[in-house]
Amino acid sequence: MGDAHHLNAAGAALPSARTLAAVTEQLQLEARIGGYEAAHAVRPRLDGLYALAGNVLGAAADEIALTESATVAWQRAVDALRLGRGDRVLVSRSGYVSCALHLLTLERERGVVVELLPCGEDGALDLDALAASLEAGPAALLVVTHVPTSSGLIEPVAAAGELARLHGVPYLVDATQSAGQLPLDAAAIGADLLVATGRKFLRGPRGTGVLVVRRGLLERLAPTAPDVRGAEWTGERDWTLVDAARRFETWEGSHALRLGLGVALAELDGLGVASVSEHLGAASDRLRGELSALPGVRIADPAGAAGSAIVTFTVDGMPARDVAAQLAVRAVHVVSVPASHGRWDLEPRALPAVVRASIHVYSDDGDLNALRDGVAALARLSVAPRAELAGAASGNGASANGSAAGAGAGAAGA
Ligand SMILES: Cc1ncc(COP(=O)(O)O)c(C=O)c1O
């Protein structure tokens, strides 16, 4: 589809034409009548976003806050917990770099205790170890990443949520890489807090994110920096907070991007996340099978718990970054994910980086075959002398984006 084989939905998926139109039409309206006036004109659609997001994520409309990214959602939620000295935070190894660095900053500066939970033999969070950690003493927070940035692993978020509920521990789920590709129901999995981003499997525009704050926790959580959007300044030194997750929003934001997100959410809801998930699961399984059959190619997804629309692999003798760059020359767009983006996951597995391919409903057989054939060619070349490799790459350089640099090739993927 499009100019190249886009296999980077886990970076930023391709939005639909209707999503794109919603964004550009709002920008045009703003340019014609003014930003405030344009917002007024589409107020019902903006207000309707909360119910749409709630539908897809398993939350009520008033449990939704719109943010600019998953990281912003995460920061507002975690800061609102006001974790302090001795507070134990139990966290799965699948955590994303920015989330990990936030927790480690709290550890370094405030004496919060970050406890990494081990993985079981299947590569997913070890639920027995989690139960033991919860029984060992009170914890202030449990954090599980549904699907990591660094593999196709699916964490057992519902079982972890059940344990958190048993022990009365607030539970934060990072659904950034799962929302839109896997069935997700914040209420059913017992997530008190959940973060997601718009641009990945939800197929919304960049610069959009969602925070879910479940009712039970909302009353206990105040933003560290209330904004006029979520608070009313009632007296010289007094204010009240909006009685909804919206207390975590800021007044300024891109209405155009949010309207685009609304269209993407409605389209996803129309397709049904369950059928999208079934389709993507089958296609990614096929891809895993075909890549693993290639000599010199190793699937890097945990064998027991992989199943999402993300497929990671390595090619013997060729750094992941070079694999991504060489594939881009062939108009196949994937990314390399370095250990520094998912150190808690990749470092114990002695993987300096992995190549990540990720698919969505627009990915067709041509895309998957192009990836497989490209990887097969590289795996053959990786044992050949370097000069041959360079020659082969330039010989194929007349593809969609013309050059590796033009395609943003080899770029590390978030
Ligand atoms: C698992 C995970 N969590 C959080 C994030 C951060 O999302 P955002 O870039 O929207 O802040 C990413 C980004 O790739 C991610 O993979």
Image (cartoon, rainbow, N blue to C red):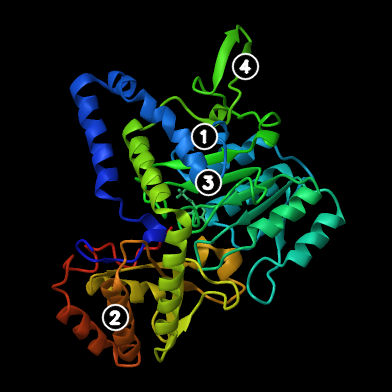
Amino acid type of the residue tagged 4 in the rendering: Thr
As drawn, is 326 to the left or to the right of 89? left
Amino acid type of the residue tagged 1 in the rendering: Ala
Check the image and name the residue furthest to the left: 398
Q: Say which residue appears at 64% left-offset and 75% top-offset.
A: 122
**Tag count:** 4
For disc 3, the neighbor class at 10 Å (few under 14, some 14 to 19, many from 20) is: many
As drawn, is 165 to the left or to the right of 264? right
Secondary element type, mark 1? strand
Q: What residue is pinned by disc 1?
A: 65
For disc 1, the neighbor class at 10 Å (few under 14, some 14 to 19, many from 20) is: many
> Marks 2/4: CA distance?
58 Å
Q: What residue is pinned by disc 3?
A: 57
Secondary element type, mark 4? strand
Check the image and name the residue furthest to the right: 136
Expressed as whole percent of the image width and height from the top left, the position of residue 178 reads 50, 57
Q: Which mark is residue 374?
A: 2
Location of residue 329 by image quarter: bottom left
Secondary element type, mark 2? helix
- Foreground: disc 3 or disc 2: 3
